[in-house]
Image (cartoon, rainbow, N blue to C red):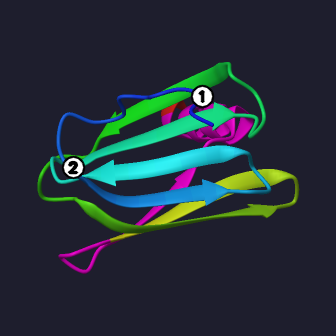
Amino acid sequence: QYNKRILAHNSEILSLHFGINTQKLFSSSKQGTFCVIDFKENSNNMLSRIDINLGPKSIISDIESYISNKKYYVLGSSYNGSLTYLSFNLDDTFDYIKKILN
């Protein structure tokens, strides 16, 4: 059954990953964009979305997600050999900003 169509990118999608434990859909495109959509698998409503433009020199070709200590992380690899490590935990982000400002 068709539930919903989501326009995630303006170009071809290179990688797609659904984190079962995180209930998040991750995708990357040829233009270097990265999209995270947070939703429940059986729900018709999207809860939230994050779009990140990494640029054409940082195109993510493979995505994996995991949970550690009740926090979730995303690992990505690119064609140029770079690894991207993303944490979507706001507390960690605020702590990082405080360290830089002090």
Q: Residue furthest right?
A: 69
Residue positioned 67% across, 57% down in the render: 19
The amino acid type, in three-letter code, at marker 2 is Gly
Tell me which segment is drawn in magenta. 78-100
Percent position (x, y) of residue 18? 61, 55
Q: Is residue 43 above or below residue 53?
A: above
- Residue that carries the numbered disc 1 in the rendered image: 3
Looking at the rendered structure, the secondary structure element under dot 2 is loop
Pointer 2 local density, CA inside 10 Å: few below 14, some 14–19, many at least 20: many
Q: Which of 101/10 is in front?
A: 10
Percent position (x, y) of residue 56? 12, 52
- Residue that carries the numbered disc 2 in the rendered image: 32
Pointer 1 local density, CA inside 10 Å: few below 14, some 14–19, many at least 20: few
Q: Is residue 86 left or right of residue 21?
A: left
Q: Is residue 24 magenta?
A: no
**Where is residue 93, by image quadrant?**
top right
Residue positioned 42% across, 40% down in the render: 35
Q: Earlier in the sequence, mark 1 or mark 2?
A: 1
**Where is residue 42, by image quadrant?**
top right
Total numbered labels placed on residues in the image = 2
Residue positioned 68% across, 19% down in the render: 45
Q: Is residue 20 above or below residue 94?
A: below
Percent position (x, y) of residue 86? 52, 53
